[in-house]
Amino acid sequence: MNPATTAAGPIVVAGFHGAVLGLGEAARALASALASTGTAVQAWDVSERLGHMRRLDLGDATAPDAGSGVIIAHMNPPELIQLIASDPTPFEGKRVIGYWAWELPTVPGLWKPAFRYVDEIWVPSRFTADAVRSAAPRGLAVRVAPHPVPVSPATPDRARFGLDPNHVIVLSAFDLRSTLARKNPLAALEAFRRAVARTHRPATLVFKTMGGAEAPAALASLLAAIGDAHDVVLIDQALSAADRDRLLASCDILLSLHRSEGFGLLLAEAMAAGKAVIATGWSGNLDYMSDRTAVLVPYTLISVDDPQGIYRGGHWAQADIETAGRALAELIDDDARREAIGRRAQEAVGAQLATPVIADLMRRFLDGDTAPPLSR
C-alpha cells in the first residue's frame, strides 16, 4: 500500500469482471467509465480466485505485477482480505482504493481488519458512506463515487419474453442471493395484487430473478407466493446484457419495495431508460431519486430479520404496501403520468449519473481533487 502514489501509473480495477453478479456488472462499468477518459485501465478478473465461476470472457485473470500505480479493489472487505492473503504481490507499492458497497446503516464488524489494507475508500452512495465512515479510522478518506449509468435505452421486445403487447408490464428484478428479505418481492407481489383489484386495465407482473440455484429456499418461497397466478411471470435465469436491457425496455413500470439498497443500480438504469419507478423512499436510492423523478413509498423502520443470514442487526425499511398498491394502480391507469415521470427521471439520471459525469468525478478523485458531492 502506498498512499503517495498518484494516478500516473497503471490503473488496475480488480473485481468480478468475468462473473454473472451485480458486483461484476458494477466493476465492468467502473473500468469502462475510466477507460472512456483516455485512462489506461487493466481489468483484473478475480472471480475464480474468490470462488466464483468465470462465465464471461471479460477481464484478465492474470495478476498485475508489484510496483507503482493504483488498484481499485471493487469488492467488499472479506473478499479483499482473502485476495491479499492469497497473494499480496499485486498490491505492493500501489495506492489501494477499496470500492465497497453495503445496504445497512452499520457495516459488519468483520470489515474492520480491511481498513489497514486501503489508502482510501470509494462507495456508491451517501447512505453507504455514512455507514463506512462510522467505522473507518480517523483520517481515512471515504468518497462517494456513484455507479455510472449509461443513458441509451434499448429497443423493447416483448415477444422475446412472451409478454402481452396489450398489458401494462410491471417489472421487479433482483438476485435471490442478495436475500429475499432485503429485496422484499413478496411486498411487491402484494402491492401488485392490490393494484389490479383497483383497475380494470390488464397488467402483468414480471419477476426477473437469478441465483435460484444458489438460494433454493428463497426461490421456493417466491414460487409458493406466486402460486398459479395467471398475471405473474417468473424468469429465473441469467440474461445476456442485451436481453437484460431489452427486458427493461419492454416494461412500463419498475417496482422495488426493497427494505434497503446501497445504491440500487437497476432502479437508476430504469430511470435512465425513461421508466416510471415506484420504490421505497429510504436508503441509497435517495441519492438520485426524488418525488419529482419517481414515486417514493413511505415506510416504517423495522429490525433486520434475514433468514438467509447475510444481514444481521440494525434496522431497515418496511414499505407501506397499501400506499404502494394505490400508486401502482394509478400508474397502470395513467399512461401520460407514467411517461412524464419517466422523462423527468431520464433527464435527472443523465445529468447526475451518466457515464461521462461519473468518469470525470472518478478521474478527479484519482488526481487528488476531493470534488464536491453531486447534488440531487
Image (cartoon, rainbow, N blue to C red):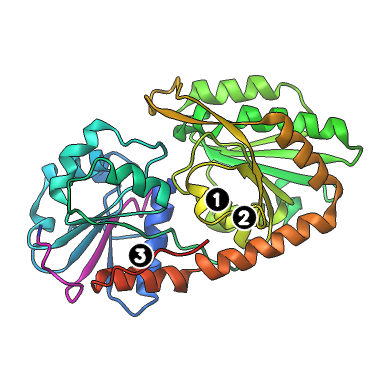
Residue 57 versus residue 20 in the image, above or below = below
The three-letter code of the residue at mark 1 reads: Leu
Q: Are marks 2 and 1 in contact (CB under 8 Å)?
A: yes
Quarter-of-image position of residue 202: top right
Q: Which mark is residue 270?
A: 2
Question: In this rendering, would 258 be left or right of 78?
Answer: right
Whether the magenta-drawn stretch holds residue 8 is answered as yes
* Label 3 vs 1, first from the N-terminus: 3
Q: Secondary structure at mark 2?
A: helix
How crowded pointer 1 is (Cα within 10 Å; few <14, some 14-19, many 20+) is rated as some
Q: Are marks 3 and 1 in contact (CB under 8 Å)?
A: no
Q: Which mark is residue 266?
A: 1
The three-letter code of the residue at mark 2 reads: Ala
Identified at 88% across, 37% down, the residue is 199
Where residue 245 appears, as percent x and y from the top left, is 60, 57
**Label 3 belongs to which residue?**
31
Region rendered in magenta: 2-20
Identified at 35% across, 65% down, the residue is 31
Q: Nearer the viewer, mark 3 or mark 1?
A: 1
